Amino acid sequence: MCIEIQKTEDRKVVIAIDSFKGSLSSIEAGNAAKEGILKACPSAEVKVCPLADGGEGTVEALVTGMGGEMQFLTVTGPLGERVKSSYGMIRESKTAVIEMAAAAGITLVPQEQRNPLYTTTYGVGELIRDAIGKGCRHFIIGIGGSSTNDGGMGMLQALGFSFQNKDGEEAGFGAIGLKDLAVVSRDHVLEELKECSFRIACDVTNPLCGEQGCSTIFGPQKGATPEMIKNMDQWLRQYAALAKKVFPEADEMYPGTGAAGGLGFAFRTFTNAVLESGIQIVLEETKLEDQIQNVDLVITGEGCLDGQTAMGKAPIGVAKLGKKYGKMVVAFAGSVTREASACNQQGIDAFFSILPGVCTLEEAMEKETAKRNMADTAEQAMRLFLAERGKN
């Protein structure tokens, strides 16, 4: 059937699948799906595009999609120790792509040592400083998965900002460093910082302080006790008030300022930054829309398709682009919940689990097994697509 259809028109397919965390990267998942599609239709023209939503995998997706390269260095980790880290750089556009989790992520802190009083974002600032030194002036930064609640103070210290107590001593690492702040100064800030612009992938809308602030909402998962949460929220209010004396536009209640323990506030207040939807940044920077305009079928997906997916995660961003041009959109996932049906109202025409039968989580996530399951499912979905198109 495929060969008969192809006599008049080659089928064009674009694939943009988010990573199956712990199993397949975005590109690995996409290439596996491509393999299945070509089994069903060898003459199809298939383009695999990287996808991420600002969290884990964003650097890989953007570096791949924008023709960049990785930079490797050792920075200060969340506990003050030295850790190996990396970021992406696109030399042509002088752009650096950074995941804050690469220097201050919660996965870098053992469960028993998680305590936001002492975890710092200093290493994030070191990544930025290194990129500036290599000529970068534009930054795309994903700020999900943090272990910190220091208001971004550590990052800012690495860039030359000064935070002192009433005795003129520089604040220490972690949220505890905010406790006795008296002075915020930008006298020794890295000179080149004023030439830099930042797009911050920030998909949470929490403010810096209050009942929906970072201390209250995200503090517990970072190891904070109720007493610590109360204290940190108070310290962050004081920090915001001091920042406002230097930067009158500082707004502790602005949506997203509570992201990553206040890192959103630090970027928006102290740098030339905008807080944006992570998936929109990735879609724009990788120019996925250009790829979708002239295809027959759009394929997307992620590790787990559920109700949260329908609220605007990466596959929905792809689906909305597909529907903008009237394309059929199919999604694949490792697991699918009943709530995933909401995705059908958000542009995904049909979705499928790639699991062929009952198995353990470990078996499902084994890389070669996941690739084979993805390829097999994509092949069958493509055969169905071709059969339906063959009737028209």
Image (tube, rainbow, N blue to C red):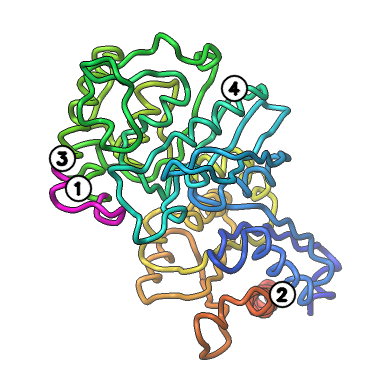
Q: Which of the marked residues, 1 or 3, is nearer the chain's N terminus?
A: 1
Q: Quadrant of the C terminus?
A: bottom right
Q: Nearer the viewer, residue 16 or 387?
A: 16
Circles 2 and 3 in contact, beta carbons < 8 Å = no
Q: Residues within 10 Å of mark 1 (few under 14, many from 20)?
A: many
Q: For residue 97, say whether it is visible.
A: yes
* Distance CA(mark 4)–CA(mark 3): 36 Å
Q: Residue at x 18, y 38 (%)?
A: 233
Mark 2 or mark 3: which is in front?
A: 3
User: Alpha carbon of mark 1 to alpha carbon of mark 3: how far?
Assistant: 10 Å
Q: Quadrant of the N terminus?
A: bottom right
Q: Amino acid at mark 3?
A: Asn
Q: In this rendering, does residue 392 appear at all?
A: no
Q: Which is closer to the viewer, label 4 or label 3?
A: 3
Vertical relation: 195 (above or below) 214? above
Q: Position of residue 79 (x, y in %)?
A: 41, 45
Q: Which residue is mark 1?
A: 216
- Observer-side mark, 4 or 2, equals 4
The disc placed on residue 137 is: 4
Element on which disc 1 rests: helix
**Type of residue at label 4?**
Arg
Q: Is 129 in front, or is 176?
A: 176
**Residue holding disc 3:** 231
Q: Amino acid type of disc 1? A: Thr
Nearest the eye: 109 or 221: 109
Q: Name the chief secondary structure element in magenta.
A: helix
**Going from the N terminus, do you reach mark 4 or mark 3 first?**
4
Type of amino acid at the residue the image marks with label 2? Gly
- Residue 331 position, x and y percent, is 55, 67
Instruction: Please say whether residue 262 is one of the residues in the magenta stretch.
Output: no
